[in-house]
Amino acid sequence: MGLPPLHRAAALGLLAALGLGGAAGCSAAADSAPRAAEVQRPAPGASPAPSGTASATSTDIGWVQLMTPMNQQAVKLLTFAAERAAEPRVRAFAVRLRTGHEAELGLLRPLLIRMGLPLTDVHAGHDMPGMVTEQDLEAARAAEGPALDRLVLAQIRDHLRQSARVSRSEITAGGRADARELARALVTAREDFLAELERLPDAVRALG
């Protein structure tokens, strides 16, 4: 995938801790977790971490490098759902969730920079739990009516659950206060949206 071994190992360390290391394209068989002294080195041209902020751990790196593309891919699906979902309340839900995810990206990307990490998607092409894939987007484009609503909401529900799970790992095991604070906010937002999703009309009930 062209991912530098250091950043790949950091991301895989978090996935392994969550039991997600077996996801397609993300086998950690030959990788080992980086030492804290290794992961704190900033990328060329990146701003240094603020004074008094803890160095990034493998959990911090893995979390922010996973959450950023998860949000980016979810925004693509939510944009489509906001325009084409059959149920008006599903469209409104997609608009609110997209707005929230875009606001989170406005915090995740600067966090990547503060940690000296690239803004590129290190998980591009990986089929991972909770990640909206290009195949998912193609399936949504081909669906219509209530079938589209069910497809979109099933994918979004999985995304919300998995991203909350990853963020809880950052809260308990992360080393940076700014990353843990953002992870807490993400978990709260996902719990709220999951509760709202379950209150949506019959198109959602069919999800089971």
Image (cartoon, rainbow, N blue to C red):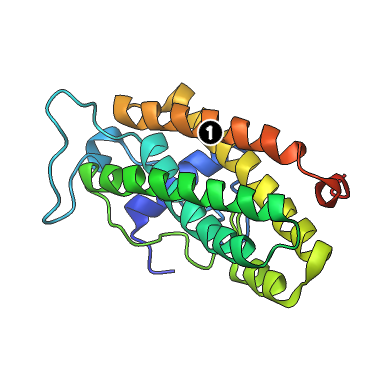
159 lies left or right of 62: right
In what quadrant of the picture does the N terminus appear?
bottom left
Q: Residue at x 47, y 22 (%)?
A: 172
Where residue 100 sits: x, y (%)? Answer: 47, 44
CA neighbours of label 1 inside 10 A, class few (<14), some (14 to 19), many (20+)? some
Front in this rendered view, residue 22 or 195: 195
Where residue 73 sits: x, y (%)? Answer: 52, 60
In what quadrant of the picture does the C terminus appear?
top right
Question: Regarding mark 1 in the picture, which secondary structure is present there?
Answer: helix
Residue 204 visible (yes or no): yes
Q: Residue at x 24, y 26 (%)?
A: 54
Exactly how many numbered labels are in the figure? 1
86 lies left or right of 122: right
Front in this rendered view, residue 91 or 70: 91
Q: Which residue is mark 1?
A: 189
Q: Residue at x 80, y 67 (%)?
A: 145
Residue 129 visible (yes or no): no
Front in this rendered view, residue 68 or 20: 68
58 lies left or right of 94: left
Above or below, 135 relative to 163: below
Name of the residue lying farthest toward the front: 88
Quarter location, residue 183: top left
Three-letter code for the amino acid on which mark 1 is drawn: Ala
17 lies left or right of 54: right
Where residue 63 sits: x, y (%)? Answer: 44, 41
Where residue 28 sits: x, y (%)? Answer: 52, 51
